[in-house]
Image (cartoon, rainbow, N blue to C red):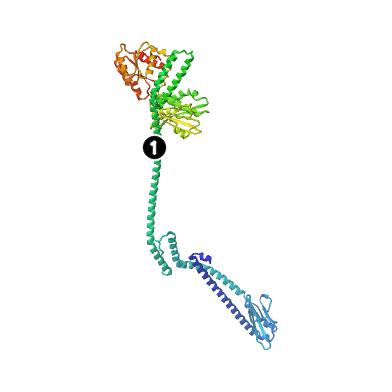
Amino acid sequence: MAFFADLSLHRKLNLVIMVTSSIAFIVASTVFLAYERHTYQQTLRSRLEFLATIIASSTTSPLTEDDAGNTERMLQILKSHQDIVHGAILKPDGTVSAAYQRDGEPLEVLERAAPFHLTKQEITLYHPISMYEEERTIFLRADLRELQKRENRFALIVLLVLAGFFIVVYVVASGVQRIISGPILQLTDVVRRVTDNRDYSVRAVKTTADEVGILIDSFNDMLAGIYDPDVALLKAKDELELRVEERTRDLVDTSEQLKRAIRERERTEAALKERDEQLRQAQKLGAIGRLAGGVAHDFNNQLAIIQGYMDMALEDVSKDFGIHQHLSQASKAIDKSTSLINQLLMFSCRQPIDKRPLTANRHVSDLQKMMGRLLGEDIEVALDLEEELWSALADPGNVDQVLTNLFVNARDAMPGGGTLTIQTRNVEVDEAYCLQVAEANPGRHICLTITDTGSGMTEEISSHLFEPFFSTKEPGKGTGLGLSVVYGILQSHNGWITVESEVGVGSSFAIYLPAVNMLAESPQSEYTAVPLKTYRGQGERVLLVEDEPDLKEMTRRALVEQGYEVEACSTLAEAKEVFDNTEIEFDVVLSDVVLPDGRGPDLVMNLVERQPDLAALLVTGYTDERGDWHRIRLAGFELLKKPMPMAFLLEHLRAAIEKRDGKETAS
């Protein structure tokens, strides 16, 4: 039953119709077969009784006369009946008086139990013969093989008819089930669509006016009652989902915009913070630079005094005396002090810059000659130089100072030896890079990178690297000005420096200088000191103007000792008065630039205007705008920077006089 319950409706109808029809056909066939069997048996019995009656009437006379031969002949009429197996006339004691056997089959007379006996295989009949003297009995036996054949033929016919019946019934049942179950299945399909898809707009098609048609009408009415509210609900749901989707999309867009704004703000704040830090650093360095530039003048004056007296003492003392060596060491200390002051001035950007087109590759190659002494034998130098390197507008001495300081810094970072790589490249700096590096300027630049394989630095150390007097060396082993000077020099050249470092890997310094479309100049030879007497005077009159008393006195004495006549003054007014009241003209004026009551260049120009053949030489301890470097050079006067060796002063003083006389200074 569970199997039947799971079948579809049309299969159930087909199965019921076929099973019912088959049962009805089988029952009808069985009844017909039973009826046919019964009819056949009754017909056979009637025939046997008829034959027995005929035999009884025919054998009465021969039996009375005891004529066995005629009796036997009378029984032979049974041969015409194929289904009769035996026939016999029995005496009262059961013995056979005459017999008939089909095909010689042995006669077997059963014990008489009834006049008529029927089995599945045969039928027997006992019919009495009435006689005067004694009763005789006719025994007939017929087999049912013909009946069995008829039944077999009938069964075969029934099977064939049943097969055709199944086909006919299936076709008829299918048509009937389509008529009956079609509307129901259509209604079921509509119900499934409504249930699965929530589609209340579908309708079942009414095809009959029976109970199923009434059910379809009721179902359609129910759907119509649900459809309108459901459509309104679905529409409201769709509108709500659309609004939610639009709102969600707006929120997502707003969120993305907010995230981008936050990221942009964070980048801007980080950039501003970095630029503020760089600005504070620049302001700090600028303040220290102004301080250094302010005190440089006083240091220069004092060093000039010491330098002058030291040179005069060395001139007067023979090299054979021990004191000459002491004085020489003291003179070297003065040179180191002068170098220290120059570094301070370079750092503060107060040092005058003589910019000219130069090729960085040439300076690297020149410095390579002295790298062995500077770096040591355990440091290998590797060059990676751009072949077509652009020219840079820079002061050659300052560039050498920058490279030397970076080489020394790399050497100190590799106490156990290593590799120093020097690389030059042409670079185009864009606006995006300038936003990352505050000091950067867009345009064409040359980049010179010095990379070492030393110990490297932490970010904390790197952030203070260019601060003046900051040093990672032990006390007494460094001034802390090397990288500060590099920073100051590059600033004065409109360049900048960047550093990348990793602890245990090494450091890389990249310096950037503006490129120019000009050919680089050939390097100039350096000054070599000579004895003071080389530039001895010949009694020329010198107007000396110096406001520092000790320096004025030292300079006066040195010039007098070298054969010059000197008039020393401290102010412009005093110098003008001496110049106006002198009876003999002066040959040369030697004046400081900055004086208490005016500017030395103004004095010189005034005196030269009044005496055109007057030679002039200016000196200054200032390195900033107060030194009037540009103005003095435009006027054609030579300007010397204090402190300087006395021989250097005498050389240029002699050159100025000879230039006035139309002579060239010997090299």
In the rendered image, the vertical position of residue 572 relative to residue 113, given as above or below = above
105 and 489: which is toward the camera: 489
Whether residue 404 can be seen here:
yes
218 and 375: which is toward the camera: 375
Lateral position of residue 628 relative to residue 118, left or right = left
The residue that disc 1 covers is 272
Lateral position of residue 325 relative to residue 154, left or right = left
Image quadrant occupied by the C terminus: top left
In the rendered image, the vertical position of residue 58 relative to residue 12, given as above or below = below
In the rendered image, the vertical position of residue 99 relative to residue 590, given as above or below = below
Lateral position of residue 27 relative to residue 566, left or right = right
Q: Secondary structure at mark 1?
A: helix
Determine the image quadrant of residue 192.
Answer: bottom left
Image coordinates of residue 622 in percent, x first then y, are: 37, 23
Label tally: 1
Whether residue 515 can be seen here:
no
Image coordinates of residue 650 in percent, x first then y, are: 39, 15
263 and 225: which is toward the camera: 263
Q: Residue at x 40, y 61 (%)?
A: 200
Q: Residues within 10 Å of mark 1 (few under 14, many from 20)?
A: some
Image coordinates of residue 530 in percent, x first then y, are: 43, 15
Three-letter code, disc 1: Leu
Residue located farthest toward the bottom when viewing the structure as drawn: 132
Image coordinates of residue 422 in percent, x first then y, are: 47, 28
